[in-house]
Amino acid sequence: MENQRETIQWERMLPQEFRQSFDKLPTVFLPLGTVEWHGEHDALGLDALKAHALCVRAANQSGGIVHPPLYGGMGGLDKPSTIKMEAEHSWENYLLRPWLEKMTSECHRLGFEAIIMITGHYGHNQQIVVREVAIRMSERLQIPVLGIPEYWLALDAGYLGDHAGIGETSLLWHLEPDLVAIDRIRNDPDYGKNERIEKGSSPELGQAYAELIIDRLACLAIAMPKWAAEKRAKFVTAERSILSAQIQGWRLQHPWAAWQNIHLEAVKQYGQLLVEEKFDQIVELSKQLRANTTSNG
């Protein structure tokens, strides 16, 4: 009797399993990250580990296929054990952008009808390049390509993104509990200078964030292959409006100008609006993001 396995991880599939998963849902997840210092308390591969685990759990819920994570991104702290593939503050990009363009093109060639790129690495230029490539390839390939950090799907839960702070530490603690040693933060002169991260982080908080992100990823994975041309065009317009606010903030103020305003109540609704396909409202929230970014300069 043939042994039956079910997996959604591309690298672990036999050809028949790939065909079965593809036929079930032709959506592919591309998790992105890097290896970088995340304090004495978190694993160095946090970014990619987190992105991959969230995609795997989402695909287990919705279907689809998860590509192995990319360990290499733009920027990184000037700390030990950190690989910097490209400069954080440079517009020139010779590695990440063409890699993402080629990967999305290959996924399209294989017949995938939707692509979800989730970056667990948050350098401002990394976020811009991932979203920028997704927008351009959505138009070039004529399939929806989403490119965002995972925290954009949980802004309304209070997760605004951080670096080895309460949010990331809690997520990793839930997803990979053996890779957080919270007591070691006391030996860290930066992250352990007070008890905020140690006392504020927990696997329970990470679970709350993860469940919301996973549910929304699963919903998008199912819905995106069904988007007709008109809906896809509205999606591209919405994502471009967010990207424009991010770029404008960088050029006119400073690199993190736009991100300083993602706490706004209107902006925090992005994840829910995306899942509900209310793209016109995302355009409106981007206008508020842009206005506050400019006025707060």
Image: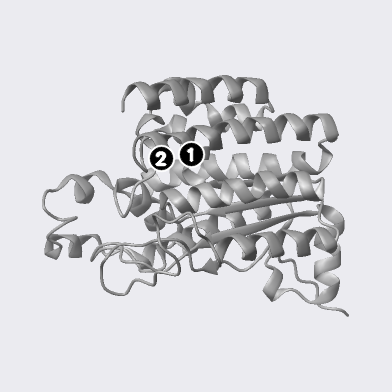
Q: Secondary structure at mark 1?
A: helix
The residue at the point 59 percent across, 25 percent down is 282
**Which residue is at the front of the view, 30 or 154?**
30
Residue 142 lies in what quarter of the image?
Answer: top right
Quadrant placement of the N terminus: bottom right
Res. 106 image quadrant: bottom right
- Residue 83 lies, in percent from the top left, at 39, 72
Mark 2 vs 1: CB contact within 8 A: yes
**Residue at image mark 1:** 247
Outermost bottom residue: 1
Q: Give the number of marks.
A: 2
Q: Which mark is residue 250?
A: 2
Q: Is residue 220 left or right of residue 162?
A: right
In the rendered image, is residue 6 in sight?
Answer: yes
Relative vertical location of residue 109 with respect to residue 168 in this rendering, above or below = below
From this view, report whether residue 32 is shown above or below residue 141: below
Relative to 118, is 91 on the left or the right? left
Say which residue appears at 35% left-offset and 50% top-offset. 170
Residue 87's place in the image compared with 195, above or below, is below
In this view, the residue in front, 251 or 196, is: 251
Residue 51 position within the rendered picture, expressed as x and y whole percent measured from the top left: 52, 57
